[in-house]
Every structure is written in C-alpha cells, then in structure tokens.
Amino acid sequence: MPLSKKDQLVELNKINKNTLMETLKIEFIDFGDDFLVARMPVNSKVHQPDGVLHGGATAALAESVGSYAAQLFSNLDEVFVRGIEITANHLKSVKSGYVYAKGTFLHNGRTTQLIDIRITDDNDNLVSICRLSTISLPKKT
C-alpha cells in the first residue's frame, strides 16, 4: 500500500536532520506532480540586524525547495543533482510569521533544470522571486 501524502511529507522532512534546513526550521508542507512547497518561520534567528528577514535565509529556503524538487523528479539511481546558479529578487520585507516557497519547473530537461521559486508571506503577498538552475550528472558505475 502506497504511503499517504502526510506520511510522504514526514519521510521527506527526515532529510532535514542535521542540516542547514533543520537549523532554519525549513519544513516541506506540500507537493504535487510538478511542484514542491516548504515553509520557514521568520524570527530573530533569520533576521537582519534591523529586524527583517535576511535575504540569505530567503535564498537558502529557495535553494532547498528548488534543489529537492529537481531531485524528486529525477531518477536518482542514475543521476545526482547539483545547483548551478540561484538568483533572488527581494520585493517585500517580513518581520514575523512564516514565509512559504513554492518551486515549479520552467524547464525540466534531461541534463538541466530551471526552477521558479515564489516566496510569499502568511497573507500570500509576494516577498521574493527566485530562480534556481540545476544540473543532473550521471553517477559513475
């Protein structure tokens, strides 16, 4: 019997143990055939000195979602996925609550992938737009 979506998310979140994702409290909360969503709490641990969400924490959230989305939709028995480039345009400040990252594919090729990651706040306001390029490389046999 296949795992329920809730159980699949529990399994997915186990990868966060002892990583930057655990430190930032990034949690995967939804996925589908072509997307992945995670959230991260906004508090003093991810603030800039002036009390708003640090762009580096936002980029870490975006890269976590984009990289793992690329892995979810790849055959990891044959390839491994690595990030090549990330861009982030920050549009709005956030002081508290959660930010949510939804990664969707703009291109999901055999070798390269381009993932669009939209970061929103608790009120669904657009906070940042990020793009992550990844590459799938063959595993050595």
Image (cartoon, grey):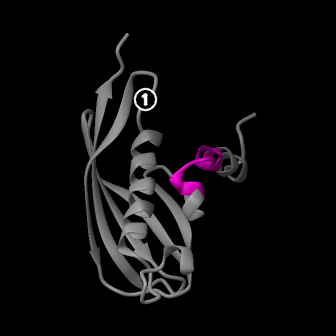
Residue 126 visible from this viewpoint: yes
Whether 18 is among the magenta residues is: yes
The image quadrant of residue 41 is bottom right
Residue 28 visible from this viewpoint: no
User: What span is in magenta?
Assistant: 12-22
**Count of residue discs:** 1
Residue 3: where, in percent of width, then height?
A: 71, 41
The image quadrant of residue 103 is bottom left
Whether 4 is among the magenta residues is: no
Residue in the picture at 71% in, 53% down: 6
Q: Residue furthest top?
A: 141
Amino acid on which the number 1 mark rests in the picture: Asn
Q: Is residue 8 left or right of residue 113?
A: right
Q: Nearer the viewer, residue 110 or 141?
A: 141
Q: What predominant SS class does the magenta segment belong to?
A: helix
**Residue under numbered circle 1:** 75
- Quadrant for the N terminus in the image: top right
Dot 1 crowding, Cα within 10 Å, few <14, some 14–19, many 20+: few
The relative height of residue 8 versus residue 139 in the rendered view (above or below) is: below
Residue 128: where, in percent of width, then height?
A: 34, 76
Per the image, label 1 sits on a secondary structure element best described as loop
Q: Residue furthest front?
A: 49
